Image (cartoon, rainbow, N blue to C red):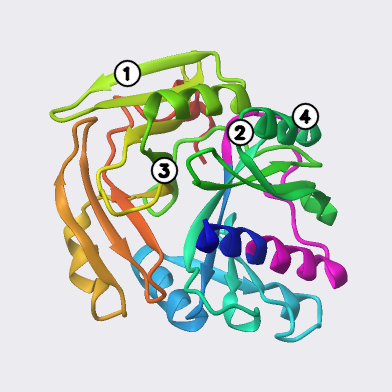
């Protein structure tokens, strides 16, 4: 638990320090007034190779990085950048080099929307989770807390001020899906079912395991699967939508990354591959047929832009 607690504490610390002098933007620049409890609305990358990571993701997926400190005339003193794809905010990047740490903590951390963050952290505590950072206001972004489920997977919770991003069809290069690799799928289902207020549960049979999807009726939100890597601690895994993983995999090494899992067919559909960026933070690639809509709300097509 030592490494996990360090990751959670430092992730929270950099966000809090960034907000001392600047107003972090909301997760959706267009106010929506929506509260989509249980939806993953943001992704933050903790990295000790910020410049190399920017080049890696920019060249592979067309992402743009905007240093928050520079935007507000504060230079490079602020450790936080926002990530855009096709002009839309999709996530952030934390430069861990300016933090006091000895362990390697590079990883992606998703943020889940909650309608009442104070009630959410109570739910975490009564269900044997860990609250590393209590609810804290982050200016325009809203209120954030950093938690871990009972098996140790780290997650950020956010109650937005101006509303959550609408459901939309992810484009190629967008974040597509987020799931938990867990040691106990049933226990994780109970925990996240309470935290996300999900009303629907779906199971998809694969060759070697059962894939569980939690959401609201026809709105899938997260996936749960038995941890496929025995030596890996339980963790949240983020997926990026790709058209074809092979051209991307061909460039991973030259950009300083590593292929952790070569492209292969996935039991729930499409092809999947797992890569790590220059800092070692892992992220998955996924092809996806929007007509099947196993992983994305059916209403999303109407909101595609």
**What SS does tag 2 mark?**
loop
Question: How far separated are the C-alphas under marks 2 and 1?
Answer: 25 Å
Q: Quadrant of residue 71?
A: bottom right
Rate crowding at label 4 as few (under 14), some (14 to 19) or many (20 or more) other CA atoms within 10 Å: few
**Residue at mark 1:** 203
Rate crowding at label 2 as few (under 14), some (14 to 19) or many (20 or more) other CA atoms within 10 Å: few
Labels 2, 4: front one: 2
Question: How far separated are the C-alphas under marks 2 and 3?
Answer: 29 Å
Where's residue 208, x and y in %? 15, 30
Q: Earlier in the sequence, mark 3 or mark 1?
A: 3
Q: Tell me what residue is drawn at x 74 percent, y 31 percent.
A: 122
The magenta stretch spans residue 216: no
Q: Does the rendering let one see residue 5?
A: yes
Q: Which residues are magenta?
A: 11-40
Q: Earlier in the sequence, mark 2 or mark 1?
A: 2
**Residue at mark 2:** 128
Q: Tell me what residue is drawn at x 51 percent, y 63 percent.
A: 3
Q: Contact (CB < 8 A) between labels 2 and 4?
A: no
**Residue at mark 4:** 119
**What SS does tag 4 mark?**
helix
Rate crowding at label 1 as few (under 14), some (14 to 19) or many (20 or more) other CA atoms within 10 Å: few
Q: Tell me what residue is drawn at x 25 percent, y 49 percent.
A: 229
Question: How far separated are the C-alphas under marks 3 and 1?
Answer: 19 Å
């Amino acid at each position: 638990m030592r490494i996990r607690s360090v990751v959670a504490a430092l992730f929270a610390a950099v966000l809090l320090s960034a907000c001392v002098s600047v107003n972090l933007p909301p997760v959706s620049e267009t106010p929506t007034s929506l509260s989509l409890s249980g939806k993953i609305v943001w992704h933050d990358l903790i990295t000790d190779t910020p410049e190399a990571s920017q080049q890696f993701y920019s060249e592979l997926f067309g992402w743009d990085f905007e240093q928050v400190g520079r935007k507000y005339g504060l230079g490079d003193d602020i450790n936080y950048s926002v990530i855009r794809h096709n002009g839309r905010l999709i996530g952030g990047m934390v430069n861990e080099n300016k933090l006091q740490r000895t362990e390697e903590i590079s990883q992606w951390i998703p943020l889940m929307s909650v309608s009442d963050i104070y009630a959410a952290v109570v739910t975490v505590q009564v269900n044997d989770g860990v609250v590393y950072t209590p609810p804290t206001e982050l200016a325009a972004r809203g209120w954030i807390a950093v938690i871990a489920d009972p098996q140790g997977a780290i997650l950020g919770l956010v109650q937005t001020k101006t509303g959550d991003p609408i459901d939309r069809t992810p484009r190629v290069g967008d974040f597509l899906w987020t799931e938990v690799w867990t040691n106990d799928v049933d226990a994780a289902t109970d925990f996240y079912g309470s935290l996300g207020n999900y009303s629907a549960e779906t199971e998809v049979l694969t060759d070697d395991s059962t894939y569980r999807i939690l959401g609201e009726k026809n709105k899938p939100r997260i996936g749960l699967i038995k941890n496929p890597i025995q030596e890996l601690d339980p963790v949240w895994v983020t997926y990026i939508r790709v058209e074809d993983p092979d051209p991307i995999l061909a460039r991973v090494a030259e950009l300083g990354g590593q292929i952790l899992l070569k492209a292969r067919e996935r039991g729930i559909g499409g092809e999947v591959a797992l890569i790590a960026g220059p800092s070692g933070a892992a992220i998955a690639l996924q092809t996806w047929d929007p007509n099947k809509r196993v992983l994305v709300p059916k209403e999303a097509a109407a909101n595609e832009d």
